Amino acid sequence: MLHPRIKATAILGVALAPLALTFAPASAALEPPTPTIEIASLNGSGCPPGTVTAIPNPGSFTLKYSGHTAKLGGDAKPTDARKNCQISLKVTLPEGLVYAVERVEHNGTANLEPTTTGSLKSMFYFAGSPQAGVYRKQIPGPVAGAWQVTERLIQLLWQRCGEQRNLNLNTELLMTSSDKSKPNSLSMNSDLGTSYHLNWKTCP
């Protein structure tokens, strides 16, 4: 149960009567809720069946990919330069709570020559709702090893009280280069995975 916080004004060290009541948001609770996660569907060249694992954590969940890799140059096919993945997730919090994604930490690995630029596009929205804004981030070469990109949401897209709509996630990797003679790769495969951090609140 949430407890009210009392705002008071003091003059010359003497506290006046409370002027207003404010209620702490549900996300201020000591114990973040752990969601239950179910992958409803996978589509796209970057996530063949069986290549994505969803892991629930207190206040967040993590997706781990094993097939989300774009390639360019060398013996790569022209279609390998762009990989996308569309995931539909059933995300459920304990009864009485709804959630919004407030931060995403994308992790992966890359092998990019100085002439190559990779880019990440990320988007998510609730099924049946207007699509949220699209996040884009360039990853210029040279890169050899791990990379991380943090996406912070200014305007939160909240789940509606009393409704259970799947959360649709879409990520795309794209590579361009002025020299395609050398092999390049950009991947979201990582032991850290991609973490979606949640804000939550109680329904009336």
Image (spheres, rainbow, N blue to C red):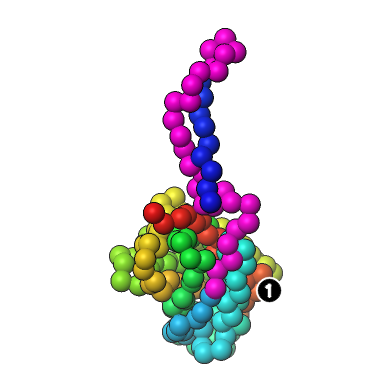
Against 16, is 144 above or below? below
Against 100, is 111 above or below? below
Q: Amino acid at mark 1?
A: Asp
Left or right of residue 163, residue 191 in this image: right
Whether the magenta-drawn stretch holds residue 29 is answered as: yes
Left or right of residue 176, residue 204 in this image: left
Give how far across and how far down residue 123 sits, in percent. Answer: 42, 66
Q: Quadrant of the C terminus?
A: bottom left
- Residue to which mark 1 is pinned: 191
Which contiguous range is marked in magenta? Answer: 10-36
Q: Residue at point 49% right, 56% down?
A: 200
Give how far across and how far down residue 45 sits, in percent. Answer: 47, 85
- Considering every residue shown, the one lying at the far top of the view is 12
Left or right of residue 36, residue 136 in this image: left
> How many C-alpha atoms fall within 10 Å of the one at disc 1: few (<14), some, or many (≥20)?
few
Left or right of residue 32, residue 151 in this image: left
Is residue 123 at least partly visible in the picture? yes
Front residue (pair 99, 142): 99
Front residue (pair 172, 156): 156
Give how far across and how far down residue 157 sits, in percent. Answer: 40, 58
Give how far across and how far down residue 115 sits, in percent. Answer: 56, 67
The number of numbered badges drawn on the structure is 1
Q: Residue at point 41% right, 57% down?
A: 203
Q: Residue at point 59% right, 66% down?
A: 34
Front residue (pair 98, 20): 20
Is residue 142 at least partly visible in the picture? no
